[in-house]
Image (tube, grey):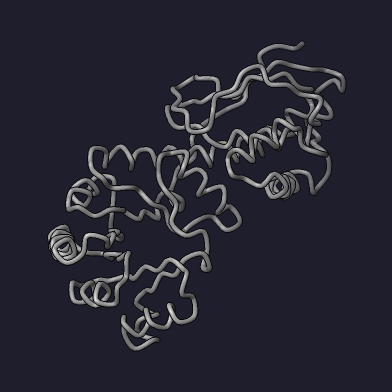
Amino acid sequence: MPLSEATVAGLEAAGLSPSSMADLVKRALDEDLAYGPDATTAATVPTDQRVRAAFASRQPGIVAGLGLVAVTLDVVVGADRWSVVSAATDGQRVERSDVVLALEAPTAGLLTAERTALNFLGHVSGVATLTSKWVDAVSGTKVMVRDTRKTIPGLRVLDKYAVRCGGGVNHRMGLGDAALIKDNHVVAAGGIAQAVAAVRSMFPDLPLEVECDSLEQVKAAVDADVSLVLLDNMSVDQLREAVQWVRSTSKSVQLEASGGLSLGSVRPVAETGVDFVAVGALTHSAPVLDLGLDVLAVV
């Protein structure tokens, strides 16, 4: 089934590929429909029935992923057979019972699409909601909350989109759009300076970051003229010392704190003066936002 112009425009505005999202939805639908049609719906719902219905939040949060709901409905119901009555926007804060999407559609197709649509909507909204809590926790500081590559396999683009909806910023999307020299790379190359030189020799235009777990390594990275340093698993005192040393040496080097962070402990870290906090939990440990679909009336 082709996607509607409105669905395509919404996905493109969000920076999401319509064809990739359609493929993702079709694979998800296959998990429900690989064993046959929706037996319960086929037995209980008149084939020509239409309803008004609403997707609504059952708890406060940040809604995101409405474009995936539209894709799911386009694929299952047909792009020209359902219509939006009202809709929230991705990144919008919602309260319990708030309607995020009201629509009119054929009952049978809507019920077949329901779980797939809610799975996407709940997951993406959950990541956005958790990200917003981290952003709120560091508000008033200059720190930006940044994600990692610790995403659900196959959902990285969506997970990172959700982070943006929650007010966070993205780190690298994969292994080829930026270089991150970690401890194992340092060992393999024979040292930080050697690793930096090797990356710059092969990929001179690629953004480069070096992971450091001691002030000595930070100094080596700065001496190698690195512009972004990851401060890994350092205490608040160690972070403060690293920030003070770097700021006294270079105004241009940016610093990112990572490892052992929690919502309760991130504020003192942010107040050390780092530029970023890297939080894998945004995408690997976000609980879903509880949303549901309610049929309001038969048309």
Picture quarter containing residue 254?
bottom left
Closer to the camera, 9 or 260? 9
- Image location of residue 257, percent across then percent down: 28, 58
The residue at the point 22 percent across, 49 percent down is 270
Q: Is residue 279 left or right of residue 69?
A: left
Q: Is residue 105 left or right of residue 131?
A: right
- How many tags in the picture? 0
- Image location of residue 30, percent across then percent down: 75, 48
Picture quarter containing residue 209?
bottom left
Vertical order, 142 against 248 (above or below): above
- Image location of residue 237, percent across then percent down: 12, 60
Closer to the camera, 39 or 290? 290
**Which quadrant of the rendered structure holds the C terminus?**
top right
Picture quarter containing residue 109?
top right
- Image location of residue 243, percent across then percent down: 18, 60
Closer to the camera, 183 or 281? 183
Q: Is residue 93 left or right of residue 3?
A: left
The residue at the point 29 percent across, 73 percent down is 225
Q: Farthest residue toward the bottom?
A: 190
**Which quadrant of the rendered structure holds the N terminus?**
top right
The residue at the point 31 percent across, 80 percent down is 192
The residue at the point 54 percent across, 55 percent down is 152
Q: Farthest residue toward the right?
A: 47
